[in-house]
Structure formats: structure tokens, C-alpha cells
Amino acid sequence: MKYTVTIRAKLRDAATAKKYHDEVTTATKAAAKEAGDLTHAVYLDPNDRRAFFGVDTWSSLEGIQRFAGSPQIKEFFAKLFDGEPEVRIWVDSDWNQW
């Protein structure tokens, strides 16, 4: 089973967020992939420079919990986001799709 994780948040500082995000995700990419992170995508709201929407696809629920629970990732979120992000875990449905 695959798990889709969504993160909605307000960036702490839109001007420096990309640089910080890219540095941290480059440094943690191998660990994330080892934990089961298959894809990582970031979307931004063209009308609100601070609105962040991240989508990751994972192969393991345990991997999500282990990776997201690490002190390094908690520190990353605290520096990147203004307040707690809304994090949701989704699973595929058998509903019609296109």
C-alpha cells in the first residue's frame, strides 16, 4: 500500500524559504528515501507567497512516522513554517479516477 502525505502551512519567511528547504531536503533525501519516501513535491499559492503545500508518496506508514518524528525534521518544520503545519496521511481509494 502507498501513503500520500500532505502538508499545508504558512512559511515563516517567504524570501528565504526555498533556499532553506532545498538545503535541508538535499541533506535528508537519502534518509527519506531509505525510510520509504518515493516522491516529494512542493506547490505554492500564486496569490499568497507564504502558502505552502507539500505532497510526498511513501511506501511505509512506519517509515513516515520514524522520519517525521526525528528531531532533525521537527527542527526543520519549526524553522520553515510559522506555527504547526497541517499534516494528513491519505491512502488510495478504489473510486473512479482520471
Image (cartoon, grey):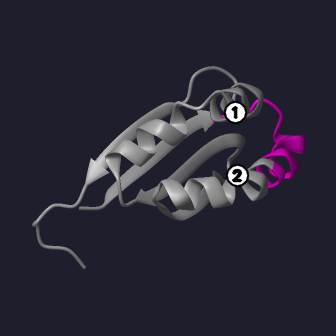
> Would you say the residues marked 1 and 2 are in contact, meaning their CB atoms lie under 8 Å apart?
yes
Circle 2: element type? helix
- 67 with respect to 71 (left or right): left
Circle 1: element type? helix
User: Which corner quadrant holds the N terminus?
Assistant: bottom left
- 52 with respect to 67 (left or right): right
Q: Position of residue 55 (x, y in %)?
A: 50, 55
Q: Which residue is mark 2?
A: 28
Q: Which residue is mark 1?
A: 72
- Which region of the structure is painted magenta? 10-23
Q: Nearer the viewer, residue 74 or 14?
A: 74
Q: Position of residue 38 (x, y in %)?
A: 48, 66
Residue at (63% x, 51% y) in the render: 45
Q: Type of residue at label 1?
A: Gln
Residue at (68% x, 48% y) in the render: 47
Q: Nearer the viewer, residue 60 or 94?
A: 60
Q: Give the class, few, some or many, for how many residues have Cα within 10 Å of label 1's Cα (few <14, many ≥20).
A: few
Q: Quadrant of residue 33?
A: bottom right
Q: Position of residue 77 (x, y in %)?
A: 67, 32
- 69 with respect to 10 (left or right): left
Q: Position of residue 81 (x, y in %)?
A: 69, 30
Q: Is residue 15 above or below residue 2?
A: above
Q: Quadrant of residue 12?
A: top right
User: Which corner quadrant holds the C terminus?
Assistant: bottom left
Residue at (43% x, 44% y) in the render: 64
Q: Nearer the viewer, residue 5 or 63?
A: 63
Q: Type of residue at label 2?
A: Thr
- 15 with respect to 5 (left or right): right
